[in-house]
Amino acid sequence: MNITYSSENFTIDKNGDFNLGIILSAENNKKISAVDLSFKYDSDNRDLIDFTGIQTLPANYFDEEILIATSSADGAKNLHLVLAAKKTDDLLSSSVTINLAFKAKNIDGHTEISLIDGVSQISGPTENYVFEVKSPTNAVGVSVGSGGSTLTQTPTPTTPPGEGNVLLAFQLRFQGIIDKPVNTSMPVKITIKKGGKVIDEKIIDFSYVEKKNSDIKGSWLGSGIFNALPGSDYTIFIKGPKHIQKKICENEPKEPLGAEGSYYCRSDQSLSISQNSSFDFSKITLLVGDLPKQDGVVNSYDTSLVRNNLGRNDEEALKLADVNLDGRVNTQDYSLIIYALSIRTDEE
Amino acid sequence: MNNNHHFRFLITIVFLVFISLILILVYSKFFSLPIITGTPMTAVSVTPKPTEKTTFGQLMLKNSLGAIRQPITDLVKLEVWADSNETDVVGYDLILNFDTQAFKLVGVNSVQADFSLFKIEKEGALIITGTKKLDISQKTLFTNQKIIVLTLKPQKTGKFSFEILSSLGKEKTQLVDSSSKIYYPKVNRIEIEIY
């Protein structure tokens, strides 16, 4: 699978628009059905351009699109695309162009857009088929207005290992997070079991996405390729970094409004996985409680962490005990942990 | 004349050195002074003896009546006594194992007003978590004192044991201090006969 850019340099006016085409070409006429790409732009807090949307060629090629725009700790903007086509094989193509639309700000300067090393994954509709990705070696240069300083070329993106065969995208909701959190990235452990046996387990970085016109203000999106075969009777376990593990055994789990954490698996339920599956688990609440260092139980150690860090807003305290991610360890965090004492343990 | 004087001085010095050596030898013989020899020192490797998990403090069960026999019509009142070895405790967990068919739990109460109790029944045991209330800022040192009273109603006659377990699955009986350090206390088991 070759990934090339429609152009390696753009020179645009201030406030101008431009489209960067990402051309995906599969060898031997293999079909493309799912794409997971992450881009980085405006590093070092440049803030010269904004991502405004995507279009694909063929048009509407992908049936499901998850776009996550976040900023990273090094001052760059990140764009994570998870695209899945649910068409029959005869409607799939071996060449797809994804046009990323950007708008420049009213500032002169120079910036770059590049694929993030080692995380690009593209798969076909056939079981066990993940393309070996050959990414472009150079970053795309963007000069706005009279242009800026010359930037050095970014390192060559490496080819990700072909390590699995189903692309799974998840949408999650965590207890207590009601506004945009201070930290918009969260590592979450996803375990896939079948017949009680662990099929695959991965820690995936989830990103917070604000939702407009929804009862839920925001949810967390993440995706990864897992070593599992399409089929049914799967169980998925989700465990956040300060959370109790939740067992999910249906594709669209729900809980009654106001009954947070009340969803439980029933023995007659079955969760199925396809080559590219998107799971919306945001209608159930993943409860907090098991704080670092996690031991699978909510107990006096966890309550003590909140109590002993109460009022603090430094990085160390937030990492340990700010469960609602509002930037301070406070009584809300304590209440959430106390609530979790009644649930007590990871679901197995 | 001058040479003679030098010779006598030298003889005196030699004599004094000789006497000193004799005195040192006699002293070391009778008073066992350590004699340093030229033997090289060797590193001594000490293999620590395997020990059981170190306990710190205690959480002990007592029957409040002090009785080992009591009629089925009377409530059983158990007490948990704690000692934190002068450590400031902000929370604790304890696992109480007893025959839930033979006793119905009527109540679990914290003796300390500064602590809130949360209980959950799990795998046939009663798990109790005590958390120090947020508005309490003074230190809490358990000095071999009663911290919990449990009330149970007997349902059967016979001899029954009540035991605080050190662990049960992922659950642990523990004390947690004001820096979130965990201590595993000494625990015990008691027997009560119901007739």
Image (cartoon, rainbow, N blue to C red):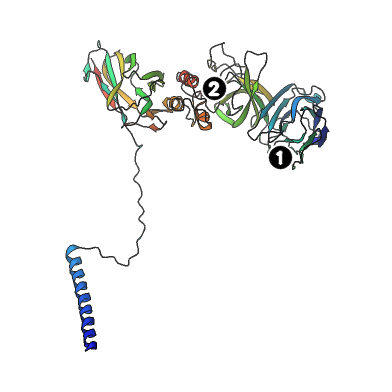
Q: Is residue A162 above or below residue B170?
A: below
Q: Are marks 2 and 1 on the same chain?
A: yes
Residue at label 2?
A324
- Residue drawn at (57%, 27%) of the image: A193
Please give left or right for residue B70 compared with residue B47 in the image. left
- B8 displayed left or right of A194: left
Which is more toward the observer, B17 or B192?
B17
Quarter holding the N terminus of chain A is top right
In the displayed structure image, the side of residue A6 where residue A117 appears, left or right: left
Q: Position of residue A162 (x, y in %)?
A: 68, 37
Per the image, label 1 sits on a secondary structure element best described as loop
The amino acid on which the numbered mark 2 sits, given as a three-letter code, is Asn
Snapshot quadrant of residue A171: top right
Q: Residues within 10 Å of mark 1 (few under 14, many from 20)?
A: some
Residue A343 seen in the figure: no
Disc 2 packing (10 Å; few <14; some 14–19; many ≥20): many
Give the residue pinned by disc 1. A159
Q: Which residue is at the far bottom?
A: B1
Q: Which chain does the residue under circle 2 lie in?
A: A
Given residues B47 and B38, the one toward you in this image is: B38
Residue type at mark 1: give it. Thr
